[in-house]
Image (spheres, coloured by chain):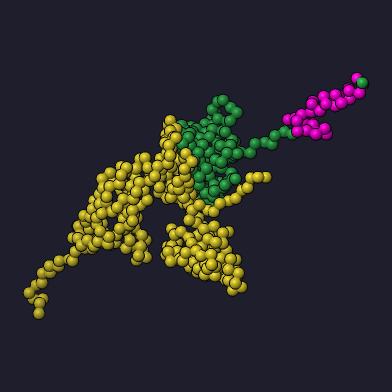
Amino acid sequence: MKAALWLSAWMGLTVVPSAPAVVERGPSEGSPLLAATTSASPPKSPGAEPQTARKAMEMSRAALKAAPDDARRREAEVRLKDAEAHFREARYADALHKADEAWALLNPPQPSNFTVEVDHDGGTTTVTHRQGPPVTVEAQHATRILARGESVRVQQGTVLPEPPTAPQPLQPTDKFRFTLKPTAAGLLGPVTLTWASVEGATRYEVEVVPEAAAEAGAEPAAPMRAVMGARQWALPALPAGRYRWTVTAVSPDQGRSVPSAPRRFELAADALELNVKVKDGWQK
Amino acid sequence: MNGRRWPPLLFMVALATLPPGCTADEKPRGPAEAPLPPPVPRAHLRGLSGDVQIKRAVADEWSAARDELPLYENDKVRTESGASAQVVFANGSTVHLGGDSLVGIAESKLRTDVTVLRGRVDATLEKPATQSLSVTTPSATVRAGRKIEFQ
């Protein structure tokens, strides 16, 4: 048969367990330890096979440490031991393959979820990617990849529009520390976030994520989100702490931009003014 | 002389009556001798809620759908306003139909699984490393999961 079939490399950032060449991994939402490790990964190099295998084993070991003690972990442990045995025998490709298998067992890919909406006359399609590996959208022989949170609207017979550019955050400047008097409820404010306009955008999605609680090892507080028509958001009064925020431009024709580069700010309570009335007889 | 001409002429006439592509030993296959294999469902309907209807590829009329109904190539499913249903494909990928939607099950020879003609669908692949799903609309094609390429 003249037809040939092959399964192409996995489209997203997830690792292919059977692909020994894949070592660099995208950040895993369920594994901050690995995400941190990944950022330090050296680039792939065809001539660096022992180093590549060693790095893959290091990452799998780190994932193993963080994994709960269950059947999947035990299976991964076996694969990692196999990888180490291969490495000792200088079978680096096999070591890499087994280390990848261990990593994949500990980091199962997320489900993929996306929405397709077709208007009543069938002329317009809106695709929104919600979760998991990216999806591709093809129209008029052009292809675009949609990552998490991105969307695109396609008119029948037209080419795929480019997404809007990410908005540029303006105020507050990065890592700005607000020192504010607490409200009666002990909250701090007001803080207003502002950003530059983006051509074609009709609204902006803003996300503010409390950071301090997560750093202290406590349950992270839920992020706050708002959709604004204006280029600013006056936040409600918030507890003291550090916050990270991003803004995404949304265009009805071009879809959503990627989120802006994150900005951080800190809210601190102004020093308390203590007025202590002391009875004369108590003072020495 | 005439007696010598007849045998080759008869042979040529006999050859001409054979169907093309057959040898003398073969006979053309009739439908009775080699019945077509039963069609394999591409998906099943599940989780029906409200007024959900189906139109078979060979039918002219819409009829009420029911849970676990097998769906074949070119069947269509529609939901009325407020209704919903799930189309679950053989590989486990799922397309959730919202209200006032119309979808068609694509032919397997095409590189797509479902065609959305109207409304909103939410597609889910629980194991995108091993599953794939392709959704086509009048203006675009969306592909998710493991990509399969043909040349």
- Extreme-front residue of the structure: B1
Left or right of B36, for residue B139: left
- Confirm whether the magenta stretch covers residue A46: no
B22 over A60 or under it: above or below = above
Can residue B85 be seen here? The reply is no
Q: Position of residue A33 (x, y in %)?
A: 43, 65
* Residue at image coords 83%, 34%: B25
Residue placed most toward the observer, A253 or B114: A253
Q: Does A276 sit left or right of A190 as displayed?
A: left
- Say if residue B87 shows up in the picture: yes
Quadrant position of the N terminus of chain A in the picture: top right
The residue lying toward the viewer, choosing from A119 and A46, is A46
Question: So how many labels did they put on this image?
Answer: 0
From the viewer's perspective, is B17 left or right of B130?
Answer: right
The residue lying toward the viewer, choosing from B13 and A87, is B13
* Position of A243 relative to A50 (above/below): above
Image coords of residue A2 (percent x, y): 65, 45
Residue at 18% across, 66% down: A271
Which color has been applied to chain B in this rendered view? green
Q: Is residue A159 above or below residue A226?
A: above
The image shows residue A143 at horizontal and vertical percentages of 47, 44
Residue shown at 50% from the left, 63% from the top: A44
Occupied quadrant, residue A279:
bottom left
- Position of residue B109 relative to residue A92, above or below, is above
Indicate left or right for A270 with A14 as reference.
Answer: left
Residue at the outermost left position = A280
Q: Which residues are magenta?
A: B2-31
Residue B21 position within the rendered picture, expressed as x and y whole percent measured from the top left: 75, 33
Q: Colour of chain A?
A: yellow
Residue located farthest toward the top when viewing the structure as drawn: B2
